[in-house]
Structures are given as structure tokens and as C-alpha cells.
Amino acid sequence: MAELHVELVAADRKVWSGAATIVVARTASGDTGIMPGHTPVLSVLESGPVTIRTTDGGTVLAAVHGGFISFADNKLSILAEVAELADEIDIARAERALESAQSELDAHAERRAEVRLVAARGIKAHA
């Protein structure tokens, strides 16, 4: 089975590293899927969930906010301003943040909270 090496790094730490069969991330041009042998890519990341399908059949979900994605020679680097693995996200806290952002009409904070909830719950993101 073909695989690519993935490094998910936030500004403050290495979040996840390993082998994958496909990675889907939201870029400035839309959701982008990267598989082994993909053409080289350098793109700006948008706030959104990142889905990593590991070579052992597992799935890693993360909430990512800003940064870049770079792919060449079957090595994918996701360099995020902020990134959290789904199991690190406190759902109750993210729900409170979403409610607060909605009441304050803060679209940016609302999007960040929505992305965190999508990753934590493992469901498809809202457009």
C-alpha cells in the first residue's frame, strides 16, 4: 500500500506525525485531498477540520486554524497557527465558546468554535 509521511505541527508544538494513505484539509481553494504521488502543493490553510487516514485503517481528526500545507516527495507538512487533535478538545468548553461568539456576533470566533466541535465530534463540517 502506498503511503505518505505526515507532520502536523502547530506554532507551539508537534501535534501528530505518522504514515497515512490520504489527508484532507481545507485550503484557500477549498477542501484538498492529498494522496501518495500527488503533485507538489503549497497552499494557505483555512480554519477547518483536517482528516488523516492512517495506514493501519485509523482516522486522526484535528481542528486547524490558519497556516500552510506543503507536499513534495510523499512528505506532507501541515504547519498550523493553532491545531488540536479531536480528543484534546473539551466539547462543553467549545460549545460555550460558540454560544459566546454567536451572542457577540464574532464570525471569526464562531468559525473557530464550529471547527473545534466538528473535529471533536467527528462529523462533517458545515460550509
Image (cartoon, grey):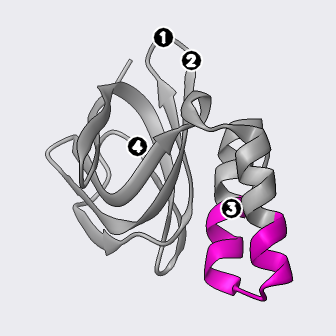
Residue 35's label in the rendered image is 4
* Contact? badges 3 and 4 (CB < 8 Å): no
The residue at which mark 3 appears reads as 113
Where is the C terminus found, in terms of image quarters?
A: bottom right
- How packed is label 1: few (under 14 Cα within 10 Å), some, or many (20 or more)? few
Query: Mark 4 or 2 closer to N-term?
Result: 4
Q: Amino acid at mark 1?
A: Asp
The residue at which mark 2 appears reads as 58
Q: Is residue 99 toward the left or the right of residue 74 in the image? A: right
Toward the viewer: 61 or 76? 61
Q: Residue at x 66, y 58 (%)?
A: 115
Query: Mark 3 or 1 closer to N-term?
Result: 1
Q: Can you say whether 69 is above or below 5 in the image?
A: below
Q: Amino acid at mark 3?
A: Ala
Q: Which residues are magenta?
A: 99-114
Where is the N terminus found, in terms of image quarters?
A: top left
The residue at which mark 1 appears reads as 56
Q: Amino acid at mark 4?
A: Met
Q: Secondary structure at mark 2?
A: loop
Was residue 111 drawn as part of the magenta stretch in this picture? yes
Q: Whole-percent x and y of residue 31?
A: 57, 65
Q: Closer to us: mark 4 or mark 2?
A: 2
Q: Is residue 99 toward the left or the right of residue 26 in the image? A: right
* Contact? badges 1 and 2 (CB < 8 Å): yes
